[in-house]
Amino acid sequence: MCNSCNSCLDTAQITIPNGATGATGANGTDGTNGTDGTNGTDGTNGTDGTNGTDATLGYARYTALITQDDGDDPVVTVLGTNDIGTLVWTRGAAGQYGGTLVGAFPAGATWLAINSDGGTNVEMGLVRLSNDVVRITTATLGVAQDGMLNGMSIEIRVYS
C-alpha cells in the first residue's frame, strides 16, 4: 500500500502486523492513548471527550469486537456508540465474512481497520466491496480459514 494518498483504502486488502502497544505505557490502558487517558474512552478525544462521539468528528463510526467459529456467522459486540447503523454479518465461505447495511459505505468516504492477534502467518483484511457491503477475510499462509476471529476489534468510519 502506498502512503501518498488514501484512495487505495477503498479496495485494498490490508494485513496489519502486530504493533508495539504496552499495557500501561504511552499507548496502554492507562496511558496517554489508553482507556482512561488523553485519547481514551473518558479522555480528551474519547467517547465523552471534546472530539468523541458527542462532539463534531466529521465522521460516523462503528466499533466492535467480532468472533467467528466453525461455519457459523460472525457475532459482534458493538463498543460504545454506533453512529453508522446495525450491520448484518454473515459467513460467505471459509474465511469470508460480509457486513451488510444498505448505502452505509460510500466510495471515497469509508475508512476501515481490523486488528490481528499477531499469530504466526495470520492474514486478516477488511475491505469495502460496495456502498452496501464490507468484507473481512482471514487466512493462514494464503489458505482461507474459519475460526480466526476471536474477539478481534474492527472500526469503520464514514466521513461526511
Image (cartoon, rainbow, N blue to C red):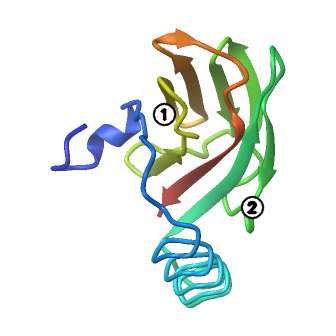
Which of the two discs, 2 and 1, labels the residue nearer the N terminus? Answer: 2
> Which residue shows up at 50% across the image and 27% down it?
120
| Residue at which label 2 appears | 79
Total marks shown come to 2
For residue 109, side relative to residue 68 (left or right): left
- Three-letter code, disc 2: Leu
In the figure, 20 relative to 87: above or below? below
Q: Is residue 129 visible?
A: no
Mark 1, secondary structure of its residue: strand
Q: Quadrant of residue 41?
A: bottom right
| Numbered mark located on residue 127 in the image | 1
Q: In this view of the protein, which residue sits in the foreground, 154 or 131?
A: 154
Q: In this view of the protein, which residue sits in the foreground, 142 or 126?
A: 142
Residue 144 lies, in percent from the top left, at 57, 12
| Numbered mark located on residue 152 in the image | none
In the figure, 66 relative to 125: above or below? below
In the figure, 148 relative to 37: above or below? above
Q: Is residue 4 visible?
A: yes
Q: Quadrant of the N terminus?
A: top left
Residue 59 lies, in percent from the top left, at 51, 66
Residue 134 lies, in percent from the top left, at 58, 34
> Which residue shows up at 65% across the image and 83% down it?
36
For residue 7, side relative to residue 141 (left or right): left
> Which residue shows up at 73% across the image and 23% down it?
147
- Three-letter code, disc 1: Val
For the residues labelled 2 and 1, the Cα–Cα distance comes to 20 Å
Give the class, few, some or many, for how many residues have Cα within 10 Å of label 2's Cα (few <14, many ≥20): few
Q: In this view of the protein, which residue sits in the foreground, 1 or 106?
A: 1
Residue 133 lies, in percent from the top left, at 60, 32
Q: Are dots 2 and 1 in contact, CB under 8 Å?
A: no
Give the class, few, some or many, for how many residues have Cα within 10 Å of label 1's Cα (few <14, many ≥20): many
Mark 2, secondary structure of its residue: loop
